[in-house]
Amino acid sequence: MKYIFGPVPSRRLGRSLGIDPIPLKTCNWNCVYCQLGRTRPLTNTRREYSPSADILAEVEIALASHQPGEIDWITFVGSGEPTLHTDLGRMIRQAKTLTNLPVAVITNGSLCYIPKVRAELAEADAVLPSLDAGNARLYRKINRPWPKLTFERLVEGLVTFRQEYIGKLWIEVMLLRGVNDTDEALKEIASAISEIRPDQVHLLLPVRPPAESWVQPADETVLQKALAILGKVTPVLQPVIGQATTHSTDDLESAIYGIITRHPMRVDELCAAFGSWSPSEVQQVLEKLQSAQKAKRVIRHGQQFWSAAGSYYAAEDSEAGDRTP
């Protein structure tokens, strides 16, 4: 399928059927940690990037092909920023007519200052926006947004959305070593979170290949400190790194391509995810995708991942400006 992938396991959403309404990589942020690589170029234009009718047709097919209990959530999560799709609200409503499963949206939250975007997101049962910094300087450094998307707009938009929204609001915080993991940075994030008043904060670590090679996850000591500081203002869910599993499939090539386009993975992870296929068959598919210029290898911190060929990552041997925060 072109727009649907999974279901993939999530510590927050159980077995999540992913819906991707945005082409790789259409985003108004260029986060240093993004597992989909750099955004080239940035865009803040809202339009119907992929036909919503085609997306919904695939949702209906995917739901019909799974047994009850195989999917826990329907999740809109783009190869970029899903709120850039102007038909997001209608797609959420239509998806909910097809199933009783709850619907989530994973977003950077940058457009929540726009009333129409807030109304579209309000159709979902859970919304998961990002907040990786507690001040404008770190926001620019980490998220590298479209110029007019200020830190103040981000926080104000999330505060207003919380006031209007009756569903689950779960803020995601990506912890980067030496960047936003100091006492001061964590206290500033906690201050912003206290204004927003989410239901939970979910801590994340950049364990997939990040856009910039210098990005490293915060260590265990800092993670415990973050739990203590942020936990004073809201319940916090700490990172859990598990292995992906998925249902059996007749089209291994399509399934592997669908997952690595949104979640770069190691060969051993793919073999575990598609356990009904042999490791040699998984490897053959990866080599076929590479020959077709649809997939490529990415090396990060001594580990090899497979990602979509269209993703762009800074080289490991890039200039000093790319290696250091």
Image: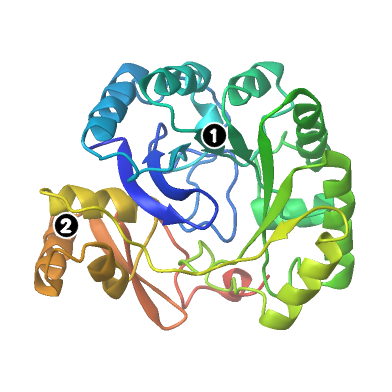
Residue 129: name its quadrant: top right
In this figure, which residue is indicated by the disc labeled 2?
289
**Residue in view at x 71 percent, y 27 percent:** 166
User: Is 56 situated left or right of 41 in this image?
Assistant: left
User: Is 284 situated left or right of 136 in this image?
Assistant: left
Question: What amino acid does circle 1 point to?
Answer: Thr
| SS state under label 2 | helix
Residue 233: name its quadrant: bottom right
> How far, Cα to Cα, is label 2 from label 1?
28 Å
Closer-to-camera residue (278/135): 278
Question: What amino acid does circle 2 point to?
Answer: Leu
In this figure, which residue is indicated by the disc labeled 1?
43
Closer-to-camera residue (168/120): 168
Extreme residue in the front direction = 68
Closer to us: mark 2 or mark 1?
2
Query: Which of the numbered marks, if any, corresponds to residue 273?
Result: none
| SS state under label 1 | loop
**Residue in view at x 36 percent, y 63 percent:** 244
Quarter that holds the N terminus: top left
**Residue in view at x 29 percent, y 32 percent:** 63
Q: Residues within 10 Å of mark 2 (few under 14, many from 20)?
A: some
Closer-to-camera residue (188/251): 251
**Residue in view at x 72 percent, y 33 percent:** 148
